[in-house]
Amino acid sequence: MWAGDVLTMKFCPKCGNIMVPVERKKTKVVLKCKACGYTLSVPLKEAKGYVMREPVSKKARVITTSKVSEPAKALRRAEEKEHEIDTYYEVVLDLMQEEEYSESE
């Protein structure tokens, strides 16, 4: 560990993988290697930069993702409709030009 506010990660002495916090006690934090299961207790001061967060369930992520994608579908539909209108407008202009050209001859 470095001195001061800068914190380096703890690595497993057995396999070299990163140690992650699994439990926080009053004066210590328990770090565990996800690869081999090795555990290490470190003083709270040394593990100051480690943050424990609750994992987000897949169901919650899917709901969030689906809500974000709904406006994208509506936007895509609006763009398609605008493209169709532009296409029809061009066709009408072409037809009008053809009629005008045929009448002048």
Image (cartoon, rainbow, N blue to C red):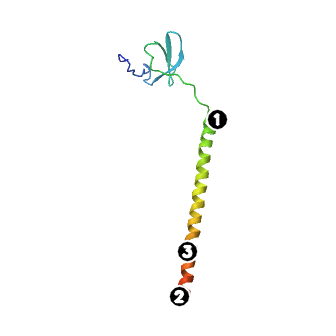
Judged from this view, the residue extending furthest toward the top is 27
> Does residue 77 sit above or below 51 in this rendering?
below
Foreground tag (3 vs 1): 3
Three-letter amino acid code at the position of disc 3: Leu
Alpha-carbon span between mark 3 and mark 1 = 52 Å
Point out the tag, 2 or 1, that comes first from the N-terminus. 1
Please tell me the numbered disc located at residue 104: 2
- Crowding around mark 1 (Cα neighbors within 10 Å: few <14, some 14 to 19, many 20+) is few
Q: Are marks 2 and 1 in contact (CB under 8 Å)?
A: no
Q: Position of residue 36 (x, y in %)?
A: 50, 22
Q: Nearer the viewer, residue 53 or 100?
A: 100
Q: Position of residue 45 (x, y in %)?
A: 44, 13
Q: Nearer the viewer, residue 80 or 12?
A: 80
Alpha-carbon span between mark 2 and mark 1 = 68 Å
Judged from this view, the residue extending furthest toward the bottom is 105
Query: Which residue is label 1 attached to?
Result: 59
Q: Are marks 2 and 3 in contact (CB under 8 Å)?
A: no
Please tell me the numbered disc located at residue 93: 3
Alpha-carbon span between mark 2 and mark 3 = 17 Å
Q: Nearer the viewer, residue 84 or 22?
A: 84
Q: Secondary structure at mark 1?
A: helix
- Crowding around mark 2 (Cα neighbors within 10 Å: few <14, some 14 to 19, many 20+) is few
Q: Secondary structure at mark 3?
A: helix
- Crowding around mark 3 (Cα neighbors within 10 Å: few <14, some 14 to 19, many 20+) is few
Q: Is residue 87 left or right of residue 17?
A: right
Which residue lies at the image location 56% right of the left edge and 87% below the top edge?
103
Which residue lies at the image location 55% right of the left edge and 83% below the top edge?
100
